[in-house]
Image (cartoon, rainbow, N blue to C red):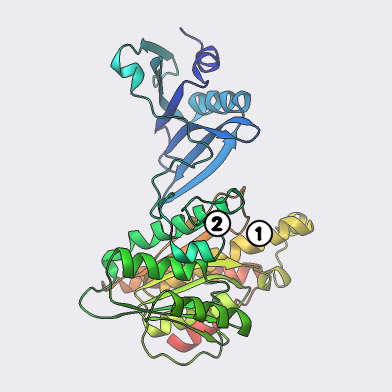
Amino acid sequence: MTDLREFLNKYVNVNLRRVIVSNARKKDGISKIQVRPIQMKNGIFYQVTRTLGPKEIHENYEKEALVSYLCCQMTENFRQLQLESRTVQGTVLVSKKGSMRITVKEQKGKKAQEYPPMLSHNRTKNYVLKEGIPVPWLVDLGVMSQEGKVKNSRYDKFKQLNRFLEFIEDILPKLPKDREVEILDFGCGKSYLTFAMYYYLKELKHYDIRVTGLDLKADVIEKCEALARKYGYEKLHFQQGDIASYEDMQKVDMVVTLHACDTATDYALAKAVQWGAAVILSVPCCQHELNGQIDNEMLAPILEYGILKERFAAILTDGLRAQMLQSAGYDTQILEFIDIEHTPKNLLIRAVKNEKVRNESTKKQQRKAWEKCIEEVHAVPTLQKLLFETID
């Protein structure tokens, strides 16, 4: 077979296991693409995962759009494609001169049977919190039935909880096991993730932790505090209070801030840095501040569209937050928290304190770069005022 489109049209079907596109022609940009089929309510779709530096970007395609996308990528950006299915293994190689060679090998016998079932919208994933095992607080919060079955209407929340615990799993080496770990959750709300964090670290991983949830709503705090006592979670407490004025602690090991609105996220990040927190996990929300400040002649034709200006402001806000945390001595990543099809508020800033002494020249160069960015858009971010007026 010599035609790539024909090859893909034939073998991208219900038998597909995965497609891996690799060997990028350029060093910058997307380094790898992975494809897998998923069963959704309105039929079979193909989830494309692009690896861009430390980030993974997910998007679902219908077959026709996927085939066109892969053909374009193999023509312009990559040199190798590997397709695995129940029936065949296929390889596409592109030479430096641009010629393409496609080989197909049939799968027979046991190999044809070694094929996992198609994921029904990710429901068979091996989660940290297991389906079928009832967890009291998940039952009380309406996510699980008494038998441990995840309710269909709450499955997105169940996935979100597990995704959050995966982020915590990654940073476990940064948390001490020889003493009590102090964790503060700013803007905890109904505290699904607060309970998940406590349950995972205390009950499953056996860390000595103390978790405090902070929120403005007195009725929410009262309910969460009652649930914590009901489950015997002696070191999980909830307080009513405001992030900006919170002064009850002198030292915190991990700060979590999920969907704290607008500049409340900045106050939480600044507090975390001032406490010297080893880990910061933040899912920002409602990034309005820079939307009212941005002024750039070159970008003016784009920014006259309200929805584009809003999205640009959100990206700019979180990018600058990550850069400022970097300047404050943290290794910082921006990661996808939950699929964007479930919520547009899907980015998580993960910052881990770097104890190594950084080169002063590199530090100044990095800070100068984001300060130049701020200057170009004529903005004055709250985090810059809070963090660097304190540090400088």
Decide if residue 277 is on the left or right side of residue 292: left
Decide if residue 52 is on the left or right side of residue 379: left
**Amino acid type indicated by mark 1:** Phe
Q: Residue at x 47, y 53 (%)?
A: 147
Q: Residue at x 75, y 57 (%)?
A: 307
Is 225 rendered above or below residue 337? below
Q: Assess whether mark 2 and mark 1 are in contact (beta carbons under 8 angstroms).
A: no
Is 275 rendered above or below residue 372? below
Q: Of the residues under marks 1 and 2, which one precedes in the sequence? A: 2
Where does residue 71 sit, x and y in percent of width and height? 54, 23
**Amino acid type indicated by mark 2:** Lys
Q: Residue at x 26, y 65 (%)?
A: 173
Circle 2 residue: 157
For the residue pair 108 and 274, the one nearer the viewer reads as: 108
Decide if residue 196 is on the left or right side of residue 215: left
Describe the element under mark 1 as helix, strand or loop.
helix
Circle 1 residue: 312
The mark closer to the camera, 1 or 2, is 2
For the residue pair 133 and 125, the one nearer the viewer reads as: 133
Where does residue 148 sit, x and y in percent of width and height? 46, 53
Decide if residue 325 is on the left or right side of residue 203: right
Question: In the picture, residue 218 is in which quadrant?
Answer: bottom right
- Whether residue 217 appears in this view of the structure is no
